[in-house]
Image (tube, helix red, strand yellow):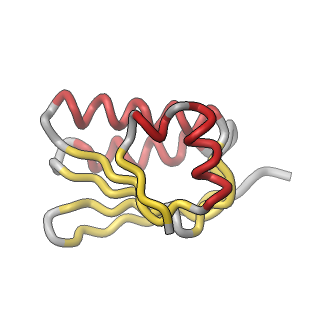
Amino acid sequence: MAALLKIRSKVEAGSVIVIPEGRIDANTASLLDKEISSVIAGTDSIIIDFDKVEYISSAGLRVLLGTSKAMLKKNGELKIINVSDNIMDVFAVTGFINKLNITKK
């Protein structure tokens, strides 16, 4: 069974808000990467709302790290909001909690 990930984006107060829903894993991380790549040039602020993200794998973490580096290069910012305790644990164990701007639910 293929993992599903739905993604939508909206612009709010000068920021692009990317809203993934489902699992971000080896099968779906490229979808998130494509969505972010399509908006990154046109904004200095990307917010990724993790409210409906159930799981993230190393493939998803790579997308977040790449996005963070791209935003830093252009003096922009990346925020990850509404992160569940389970996913916050993944960020903590991998050290991403110290590398990214992450806010819990």
Question: Residue lying furthest right in this view?
Answer: 1
Establish if 25 lies above or below 14. Answer: above
Task: Please state which of residues 101 and 42 is positioned toward the viewer in this rendering.
Answer: 101
Establish if 47 lies above or below 60. Answer: below
Direction from residue 39 to residue 30 in the image, left or right:
right
Q: Position of residue 51 (x, y in %)?
A: 53, 68
Residue at coordinates 42% horizontally, 36% vertically from top-left?
98
Residue at coordinates 35% horizontally, 47% vertically from top-left?
101
Residue at coordinates 59% horizontally, 32% vertically from top-left?
94
Q: Position of residue 39 (x, y in %)?
A: 28, 50
Establish if 11 lies above or below 89. Answer: below
Q: Position of residue 38 (x, y in %)?
A: 32, 46
Residue at coordinates 44% horizontally, 66% vertically from top-left?
8
Task: Please state which of residues 88 and 17 is positioned toward the viewer in this rendering.
Answer: 88
Q: How many marks?
A: 0
Q: Position of residue 44 (x, y in %)?
A: 15, 48
Residue 27 in which image quadrant: top right
Task: Please state which of residues 30 and 45 is positioned toward the viewer in this rendering.
Answer: 45
Residue 7 seen in this snapshot: no
Residue 13 seen in this snapshot: yes
